[in-house]
Image (cartoon, grey):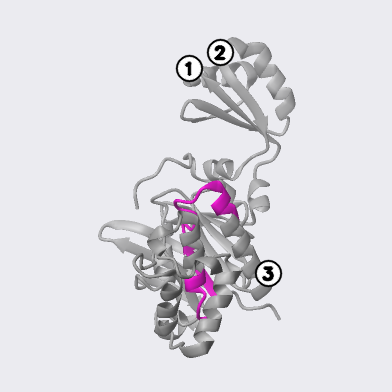
């Protein structure tokens, strides 16, 4: 018998007045997976995250998570989730340890058991030596580690992280993801993240691409990239629209304009590379050949480049 998904969402829609933020969204998240929502600002990530974390109520559709109806059984559901929002959620005036202890009190934890749990989590995230420090004195990366420890104080089965790498340098971002992968591997925690960063999306087991409130594609990063066969040529030109027309006429190749660049997906990318250089080298500032990326998948599915969005 197949294991029940950690999250199942059916026909979920949400409006802010006249604006449709989520439009009949359907997806499921496997138990013990790292699942990512990838999309630009305005795609619906924040609204979806707010519903999953019970900040926003359901309007249309159904959400079942950890065996609970999120709308009608929200109290018990909240007991089993840990949430880290994009905006910092630590009390800056308290120490690291005090933040964790007060979080534990919210879940009815106390005494020696709570202190032992705090010490274990601080050690796990490499901040045990900073437990007496005021949070405001920590770097962004250390604060994120403390936030992760804080949201795990009650042993949740599901971890929800909204843009977890916000404000982190590359080294701190790598450490954060190493911690998430360790949580999944050693404790079976299901992790759901929202992100607009391609490198983060590549570390997820599965992704849902969000655009204008719709899930336009879902699958593992490799499966999504395999939707585009062959290779991708990226051309930077002074007059991209002129070159686009010439490519269509003289080489019979269709290209997509993305800002000042042209993108071409072809099974015979290397051969085409040579043809284009022979004919149009004087019109090209640079040209590169590579495998399709998740951004290419987004462009193919939506007709828009990843950065073209509205504020959510």
Q: Viewer-proximal residue, 200 or 273? A: 200
Q: Viewer-proximal residue, 90 or 235? A: 90
The answer to whether the residue labelled 1 contacts the one labelled 3, judged by CB atoms less than 8 Å apart, is no
Residue at the location (65% across, 46% down)?
Answer: 225
The CA span between labels 2 and 1 is: 8 Å
- Of pointers 1 and 3, the one earlier in the residue sequence: 3
The answer to whether the residue labelled 2 contacts the one labelled 3, judged by CB atoms less than 8 Å apart, is no
Expressed as whole percent of the image width and height from the top left, the position of residue 49 reads 43, 64
- Of pointers 2 and 3, the one earlier in the residue sequence: 3
Task: Give the labeled residue for mark 2.
Answer: 283
Q: Secondary structure at mark 3?
A: helix
The answer to whether the residue labelled 2 contacts the one labelled 1, judged by CB atoms less than 8 Å apart, is yes
Q: Is residue 166 left or right of residue 253?
A: left
Identify the mark at residue 9; answer none if there is no mark. none
Where, by quadrant of the figure, is residue 191 drawn?
A: bottom right
- Of pointers 2 and 1, the one earlier in the residue sequence: 1
Residue at the location (50% across, 78% down)?
Answer: 153
Q: Badge 2: few (under 14), some or many (20 or more) residues near its Cα, within 10 Å? A: some
Q: Secondary structure at mark 2?
A: helix
Q: Quadrant of the N terminus?
A: bottom right
Expressed as whole percent of the image width and height from the top left, the position of residue 287 reads 62, 23
Mark nearer the viewer, 1 or 3: 3
Q: Badge 3: few (under 14), some or many (20 or more) residues near its Cα, within 10 Å? A: few
Seen from this angle, which residue lies furthest left? 17
Expressed as whole percent of the image width and height from the top left, the position of residue 136 reads 38, 60
Look at the image and give the residue range highlighted in magenta: 149-174
Task: Give the labeled residue for mark 3.
Answer: 185
Where, by quadrant of the figure, is residue 218 drawn?
A: bottom right
Identify the mark at residue 239; answer none if there is no mark. 1
Is residue 281 visible in the rendered image? The answer is: yes
Is residue 67 visible in the rendered image? The answer is: no
């Amino acid at each position: 018998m197949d294991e029940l998904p950690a999250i199942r969402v059916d026909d979920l829609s949400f409006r802010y007045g006249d604006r449709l933020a989520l439009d009949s969204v359907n997806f499921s998240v496997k138990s013990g997976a790292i699942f990512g929502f990838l999309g630009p600002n305005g795609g619906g990530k924040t609204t979806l995250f707010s519903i999953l974390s019970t900040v926003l109520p359901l309007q249309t559709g159904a959400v079942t998570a950890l065996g609970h109806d999120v709308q009608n059984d929200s109290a018990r559901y909240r007991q089993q989730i840990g949430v880290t929002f994009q905006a910092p959620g630590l009390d800056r005036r308290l120490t690291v340890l005090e933040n964790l202890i007060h979080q534990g009190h919210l879940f009815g934890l106390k005494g020696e058991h709570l202190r032992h749990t705090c010490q274990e989590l601080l050690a796990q995230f490499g901040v045990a030596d900073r437990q007496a420090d005021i949070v405001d004195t920590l770097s962004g990366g250390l604060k994120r580690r403390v936030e992760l420890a804080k949201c795990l104080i009650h042993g949740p089965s599901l971890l929800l992280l909204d843009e977890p790498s916000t404000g982190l340098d590359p080294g701190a971002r790598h450490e954060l993801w190493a911690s998430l992968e360790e949580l999944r591997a050693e404790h079976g925690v299901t992790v759901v993240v929202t992100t607009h960063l391609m490198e983060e999306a590549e570390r997820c087991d599965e992704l849902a691409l969000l655009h204008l409130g719709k899930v336009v594609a879902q699958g593992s990063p490799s499966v999504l990239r395999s939707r585009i066969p062959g290779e991708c040529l990226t051309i930077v030109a002074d007059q991209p629209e002129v070159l686009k027309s010439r490519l269509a006429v003289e080489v019979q190749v269709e290209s997509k304009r993305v800002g000042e660049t042209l993108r071409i997906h072809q099974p015979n990318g290397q051969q085409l590379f040579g043809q284009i250089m022979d004919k149009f080298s004087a019109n090209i500032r640079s040209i590169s050949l590579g495998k399709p990326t998740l951004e290419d998948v987004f462009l193919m599915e939506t007709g828009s480049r990843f950065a073209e969005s509205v504020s959510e």
